[in-house]
Image (cartoon, helix red, strand yellow):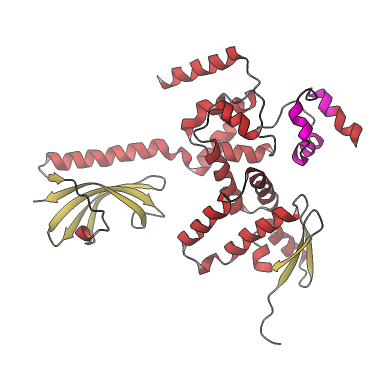
Amino acid sequence: MGSFLSAPVSKTELLEDSETSQAETCKRLRMMVSCDEDPRLIPSLPDEISLQILARVPRICYLSMKLVSRNWKAAISSNEVYLLRKELGTKGRKKKKMNKKKADGFLEKMKADGWKCWKPNASLNGSNHQSTCDWPKCSYAGFQQIWFAAAMRSPSGRYLVEACGTHRRNWLDIMKLSLNNVVRIP
Amino acid sequence: MVGVKKKMVTLVSSDGVEFVVEKRVAEQSLFIKNALNEGGVEEKVMIPIPKVTSDTLSSVLEYCEKHASATEFQENEIEEWDKEYIEKADLDLLYYLLQASYSMSIMGLMELGAKKVASLIRGKSPQEIRELFNIKNDFTPEQEEEIRREMQWNYE
């Protein structure tokens, strides 16, 4: 067994590397499985798992990740990570921005049409606005994100509400909501 | 005849420790579910789980047990529980949990672990990432500079 192990070790010139003397089980396993010179992305994990991890890191971290090692750079630029991201829906970022823009545009138009606007401190669930949605004027759902404007009726009058939040399945099933704007309908 | 007896399955870890669990708990793993379906054996099933040690397996089964009875809880309760469960795992356990969930086909646990490790990468410098995972930097300073420049172009 010793001789079997020593072959790939000397081949990859890892002997001078003091870190390998830790001889973790995973590392030994790795050498038995693959004798090629490419080290793994994350030494303690098989690459198929590491790729799953990399695909779940937000894109903003890509510069740091590309600078880790040659392997990491290749992996992050690879089609595999791209496809995994696509599958996971984390690529929905671009789409989300467009939807937000549309919702903003809608609000701008409403304001231009003479809606009065005031910013409330209370949340939608707070006592000020316990009314239910009359009708959704527009709703845009991206990946787990939603922007919408809706007319609402409360004891003090009618309001147009612009909000964004996270949803579970569709815009009716909203988990967290933050209010961006409330426009009083004259 | 005294009520319905729960179907039990015995899982054997790589270091030979036996875990007797309910079938519905073990079936959180697709690997085990398939093994049980194929085998068609009703009583006294023994399933060896290769490459998964008893320490890891007991942690994996903790997860399976919770998720087998997920219907009894609110969705956010499960989310809270997941968060706490993965929070207390150190990096080594995370590695083992990921490998176990991968080989045993427990997708939820795999997702949970991968997300956790991804969150550790987030916001770290290249050197910090290398230190975290014990990765050797095989770039020359010139190459590093080149990548930085290349990336800058993309952002401008």
Which quarter shows the N terminus of chain A? Answer: top right
Q: How many marks?
A: 0
Image position, residue A102 (x, y; %): 28, 39
Give whichever of A150, A71 is nearer the camera. A71
Give whichever of B132, A65 is nearer the camera. B132
Q: Residue B127 appears in which quarter of the rendering?
A: top right
Image position, residue B116 (x, y; %): 55, 45
Query: What residue range appears in magenta?
Result: A8-33
Image position, residue B16 (x, y; %): 82, 58
Above or below A74: residue B49: below
Residue appearing at x 61%, y 28% in the figure: A72
Above or below B5: residue A106: above
Residue appearing at x 58%, y 51% in the figure: B88
Give the left or right position of residue B74, taking residue B68 as reference: left
Q: Residue A115 appears in which quarter of the rendering?
A: top left
Image position, residue A56 (x, y; %): 53, 40
Q: Residue B8 appears in which quarter of the rendering?
A: bottom right
Q: Residue furthest top?
A: B142
* Residue A78 can be seen, yes or no: no
Give the left or right position of residue A40, taking residue B74 as reference: right
* Residue A9 can be seen, yes or no: yes
Give whichever of A132, B113 is nearer the camera. B113
Give the left or right position of residue A147, taking residue B84 as reference: left
Q: Per the image, is A1 magenta?
A: no
Above or below B35: residue A79: above
